[in-house]
Amino acid sequence: MSVVAASAALVPLASPDNAVQTAATAADGTTPRLFSAPGKDLGSDYTSSSDAIVQATGDAEGLHILAAKEDDGFSFYEIARLNRKDLSEVGPWTGYVCTTGSGNYAAAVYAPSTWSNQPGAYENGAFAAVIRLSDGKVTEVPDRVQLAYFTPGCGTGDEVAFTSSTATDKSAGATTVTSVDAPTGSVSSRRTVDGYLTHVTPTQQGTVGVLGGNLVDLKGSGKKLSARKLAAVPGPMFALTAGKNGTVDVGTVDGKSSVISRFDGKGFTELGRAPKGKVKLLPVAGGAAVVGDVTGIDTSDAPGLSEHAVDGRVAGISRQGHLVTNSVFSEQMKGITTRIGASSDKDAGTLTVKATALKTGAKATTLVDADRKRPEPKSDSSTSDSSGSMDPAAFVLAGGDDEDPLTCGEGGPESQCLSGSGAPVWGKVGTMETPCIVKRNDPKRQALQPSANMVEWAVDQAVHGELKVSRPQDWHSTGLAAYTPQGLFPKPGLNGGGDIPAQVMLGILAQESNFKQASWHSVNGDSGNVTKSDWYGNENGIHGYPNREKADCGYGIAQVTTGMSEKDSPRLDTLRAGAVTTDYAANIASGLSILAEKWNQLKALGMNTNGGNPAYIENWYTALWGYNSGVYTSGSVGLGFFNNPINPRYPADRQPFLRYSYDDASHPGDWNYPEKILGWAEVPQMTWDGEESYSEPDMPLGGVKAAPRDLFCNSSNACNPDAADPCPSWDASCYWSGSVDWMGSQSTGNSSTEKLNYSLGSGEPELKSKYGHGPCIDHPSVYTNAIIVDDLGQHENTYGCGDFEAADDGKFTLQTGDNITTLRDDGTFRATPYIAPIDLHQLGAGYDHHVYFTHNYPDTDYFHKVTGRWQVNQEKLPSGDDIGGERYKVYIHLPSHGAEAIVRYNFIPGDNVAGAESDYCRVNQGTRSAGKDTWFEMGTFSFWKGGRIEADNLHDAGTGDDNVVFDAIAFVPFSSPDPGACNLNDGGL
């Protein structure tokens, strides 16, 4: 039991600390090794080996940093988990990791995967950290950095190079190199050079990188960085590693070959070739390793460079080259997107590792539970004082204002000395109001999270103009007029005729929102706030104040932005905006017009793709390019360089996205946008229960044939396909403005076409809900006379539950922040009501199928404080001079899913002459619900006018992880005292 009695004189029913210890002990159970017979598969001497490996993969829980040691049979465990609790509703994470030369530290960059859909966002928006491998201590790097396959840069020592770039679709910008000393985690320098600098790596002879297609030696002075040319890199790149004695090894592409070359201080010497994509160049202790199809590569004259023959894909290699990982990925990245409550056996945090032992060739596959306890380190105990979790104090975005400074005359926190009567924040509050026209947390604007079958049906209908399902007036209690999705948003016409293939649109929805109409907090069948982009203009943060000017009003499954901001002209009317928000089908119908617009713009510019027939999926490559980064239709016209497949930010040896492994979904930044969409079209996402979310298209060649990497690069756009940086300026001269053809004469025998799973005109399929939903209105036990005070007030919601009974007999209110909005003495401002609501959400769970929830925070974090108040209609309560008061037996309702934290409920009797005082009871919302909708009896308590029950998210200090839910409370008139589980003090009255 996890309810703790409130009164100091009473003994708790159970100790939460004991519960935590029990969980920790259970999590430390025996876990299978990667190899069941390590002596046979790794060699009899494996127990004396010092070999180790570090890998990374992401999902909705964060970027998992995994480690394994050979003397433990390469049993993988999570050494650290990187995410940002200060970001809201961002979905899965992605990133990259490298190990420093000493092997004692790892460096990582990480960011939300969805940021890969925003051109340029990866160039200077990712986060950086250094991890001490002896104990998992994480040290955050304060700079925002680039997230690309060539960062971070680890070399032969313990210096790490992180980069950030100001490159855009119109300019190569400048690159800043942030050098970090791994043992201390401190920044030693920040220096900038003009141009797009890649593969920055410390070596024994200094730091090198690739700039303008040349290997350069980087020297710094103050804030400037100079780049001295060492040699021209022999082709488009996929790897650079630091070798012995200052040598540098590179992996490049030449036609259909991957080429390995060494720079010895004078020039590059080719060491051999393999079929493109069949060999990897990876750092190991003291040098590098060539892994994969190495039959054509000779490293005998390259000291420190080893070669290892391995079949299949290669993801990483151990430091001494005893183990190769073939893939490392979270099962969630197949599309299993659950965040709340019990899940399938393939959930976030369940990681698949496939590997090969190089000594014997033995192959193994294992599932890693990222939550299992890390083995105790064998190193000196002086380094074992930290865990793999990050200090919550580090979670403050640049520009945030989430602190409680000392401004009282006595030096105390302002929250203790301001009464709210300070100077108002004139001129500031307006800048924090989001311009997005449909606001969050409105029960009449909840979005239903559709199941995958519904999404596929809607797309099948919409692309052919048949999405005419009738939405009656007040559909799902939205209050909207009746409509049909394509009555509001008719199917757009394509220049030249034809339709958008269903799998193209399905691929966009998979990449843009993971089939989510509602937020990531809602699973299939739940309702909640609509999935959004950066509505608050604060980089999805929950610490920084909203910035109206930077807000991005993207809504729902297709991330519809057009007409959804107060700044748009024209903007959508109430009906259309409401439908885009609440109805996945209307959202899809609206999203089609954006893609069609790009197709038509390219047609108008005379830019045809293959035969120009829209029926063939391959022919949408350039329209997808424009869908993501825009089509330039005046001045220098065409498509910008960012999504050009020749762009050096994408590894030149990459294979088609997802074709060989879902592992690709964990690092989507390695592919341009069209490649990702065509990958999702070819390889469907999976549902939460392991089924394909939609049908594969008809693919006579076995896959969707994406454009060759060098197709959009020739003299017409100042592009050299054989160079490491084909168009170094990245400006308008690099735009592609011509027609292309890589398919030849097209037919259904050589080109991919859509496959409809639902016949045109068929009815909307049944919702496949992950959780069942009980009756809309019920009562605790036999007490049908209970006064139910619900969080929903008198609203209705997505599930059609009517007004709850006795709605006028009570009242529920929410307060965000501490109601202090004032100018500070130093000219800054404080407005907690504009920060706390960012991490307040609604969910279709609990009583009447609606709850509000936030997360638990430290007990002085007033910026994120959310307070719920439940009170009986005050006219039903006696005045304070009534000795007896009004006694009620109190029940709280707990939802079947979505509640996790220990929450303190405060019982406030109201002013009275009887001497009754306030009391409280702490309830573990997660364990008390036991996965079911539950009424939990707390005991009896007497109230007078002013009496109420309150709960907030600060009473039990938290870290921002656990959900605090505000659901219904039932007040049952009761004649005799009953202490109940909480032993409230009314038991003695």
Image (tube, grey):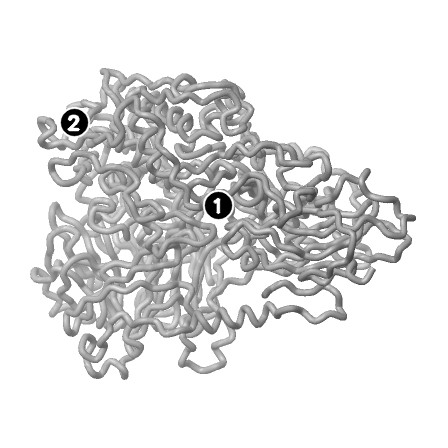
Task: Judge by depth and name the residue closer to the eye, 524 or 178.
Answer: 524
Q: In the rendered image, which quarter contains the C terminus?
A: bottom right
Residue 665 visible in the current orientation: yes
Q: Which mark is residue 521?
A: 1
What is the crowding at mark 2: few (fewer than 14 residues within 10 Å), some, or many (at least 20)? many
In the rendered image, which residue does mark 2 sit on?
610
Residue 819, quarter of the rendered image? top right
Q: Is residue 645 left or right of residue 528?
A: left
Q: CA distance from mark 1 to mark 2?
A: 42 Å
Q: Where is residue 361 drawn, in percent x and y?
A: 15, 69
Please tell me whether residue 645 is drawn above or below residue 108 in the rendered image.
Answer: above
Question: Which amino acid lies under the numbered mark 1 shown in the image of this protein?
Answer: His
Residue at horizontal 45%, vertical 22%? 471
Name the element at disc 2. loop
Task: Judge by depth and name the residue closer to the eye, 828 or 853.
Answer: 853
Q: Where is residue 570 drawn, in percent x and y?
A: 50, 18
Q: Is residue 489 left or right of residue 812?
A: left
Residue at horizontal 19%, vertical 23%? 612
Question: Which amino acid lies under the numbered mark 2 shown in the image of this protein?
Answer: Asn
Please tell me whether residue 236 is drawn above or below residue 848 in the rendered image.
Answer: below
Q: Which mark is residue 782?
A: none
